[in-house]
Image: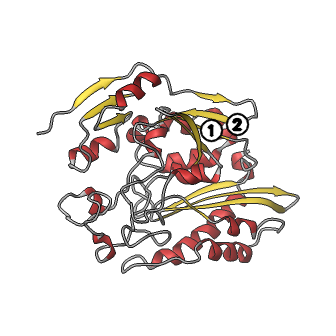
């Protein structure tokens, strides 16, 4: 059995120093990393515990937005008064993810780094997985592909991002704050996760040794009209076959701007700005929503077992938009 060194960081600067040692991994709630370690998928040499570095606060920004510390627990964030009031879409998405017990442990930063649940990745009994063993092939392409991507996939990988939170954050134009050996940087959530291309082992643009410190949310005009819809095989503790974060800003019965982001269909939250632009300046109708939905999944490519996702994604978009339109009383 491989030995693992454990060290507890006292502050972010200390955590960054510890993480520069080879084979280091940050650990917060551990809800994903520990499972992958038990299965032999992840094999870190050193765990850097960041649970005591002071990154669990939610605070207001001068512009009216919010800053969410990377170690904020999912359950605490979902129930935070300002999140429920200003960003109900995020609260809905968080409550759709996992069980209450897992939400009590899982952190925002850990959720951003959550790895795919593709069975060919999580089970080391399968020899072909480019994400786990680069260059070995992608067993999912010819295997059981029901839960896999229909958008943005590559010959190297057709896995999907499993997070509900990420889908909502993409719709809310979130920005991820990063600290590392080269200093601090800000990355738009839309640019944080990668499409697989030829390097599917790289889930994000995070560089080795960098630490997520917070997520910034700009002021949102979507609080009154937003909805997170998750379509899954069972009502509790199941990953999305397809999910939709839909958000509308309405003025005098007309859509002034919209956000449509899909989950469960790609290696990252899937947003097509052109589909959102189709809605601007128009009163809502189901026909308009169907046209936007068709644009949102343009270019979709199904595999042996997931052809149904193409139609399901479009129906889910229409349903989520209709729910968002009528959520004014619920979310106000």
Query: Residue pushed farthest left?
Result: 1
Tell me if mark 1 has few (under 14), some (14-19) or many (20+) residues whose alpha carbon lies within 10 angstroms of its own. many
Mark closest to the chain's N terminus, 1 or 2 = 2
Residue lying at 28% horizontally and 57% vertically, measured from the top left: 132
Exactly how many numbered labels are in the figure?
2
Quarter of the image where one finds residue 186 = top right
The residue that disc 2 covers is 65
Q: Quadrant of the N terminus?
A: top left
> Toward the viewer: 229 or 182?
182
For label 1, the residue is 216
Q: Secondary structure at mark 1?
A: strand
**Left or right placement of residue 297 versus residue 107 in this view:** right
Snapshot quadrant of residue 143: bottom left
Report x, y in % for residue 150.
47, 72
Residue appearing at x 41%, y 18% in the figure? 10
- Can you see residue 51? no
Compared with 216, 131 (above or below) is below
Q: In which quadrant of the rendered image does the C terminus lie?
A: top right
Inter-mark Cα distance, 1 to 2:
7 Å
Q: Is residue 307 left or right of residue 319?
A: left
User: Residue 130, image x and y in percent?
Assistant: 30, 63
Do tag 1 and tag 2 residues touch (Cβ < 8 Å)?
yes
Identify the element where label 2 is drawn.
loop
């Amino acid at each position: 059995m491989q030995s693992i060194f454990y060290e507890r960081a006292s502050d972010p600067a200390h955590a960054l120093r510890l993480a520069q040692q080879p084979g280091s991994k940050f650990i917060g709630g551990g809800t994903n990393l520990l499972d992958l370690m038990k299965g032999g998928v992840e094999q870190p040499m050193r765990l850097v515990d960041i649970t005591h570095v002071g990154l669990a606060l939610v605070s207001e920004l001068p512009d009216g937005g919010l800053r969410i510390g990377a170690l904020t627990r999912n359950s605490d964030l979902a129930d935070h008064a300002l999140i429920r009031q200003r960003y109900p879409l995020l609260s809905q998405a968080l409550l759709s993810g996992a069980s209450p017990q897992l939400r009590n442990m899982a952190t925002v930063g850990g959720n951003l780094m959550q790895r795919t649940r593709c069975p060919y990745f999580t089970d080391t009994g399968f020899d072909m997985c480019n994400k786990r063993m680069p260059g070995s092939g992608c067993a999912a392409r010819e295997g059981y592909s029901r839960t896999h991507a229909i958008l943005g996939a590559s010959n190297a990988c057709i896995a999907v991002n499993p997070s509900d939170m990420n889908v909502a954050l993409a719709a809310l134009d979130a920005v991820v704050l990063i600290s590392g050996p080269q200093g601090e940087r800000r990355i738009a959530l839309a640019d944080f996760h990668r499409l697989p291309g030829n390097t599917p082992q790289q889930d994000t643009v995070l560089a080795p040794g960098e630490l997520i410190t917070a997520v910034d949310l700009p002021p949102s005009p979507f609080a009154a009209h937003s909805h997170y819809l998750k379509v899954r095989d069972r009502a509790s503790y199941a990953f999305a076959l397809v999910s939709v974060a839909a958000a509308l800003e309405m003025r005098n019965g007309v859509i002034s701007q919209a956000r449509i982001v899909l989950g469960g269909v790609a290696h990252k939250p899937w947003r097509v700005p052109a589909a959102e632009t189709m809605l601007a300046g128009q009163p809502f109708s189901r026909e308009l929503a169907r046209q936007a939905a068709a644009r949102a999944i343009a270019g979709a490519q199904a595999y042996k077992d997931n052809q149904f996702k193409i139609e399901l994604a479009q129906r889910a978009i229409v349903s989520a938009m209709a729910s968002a339109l009528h959520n004014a009383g619920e979310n106000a």
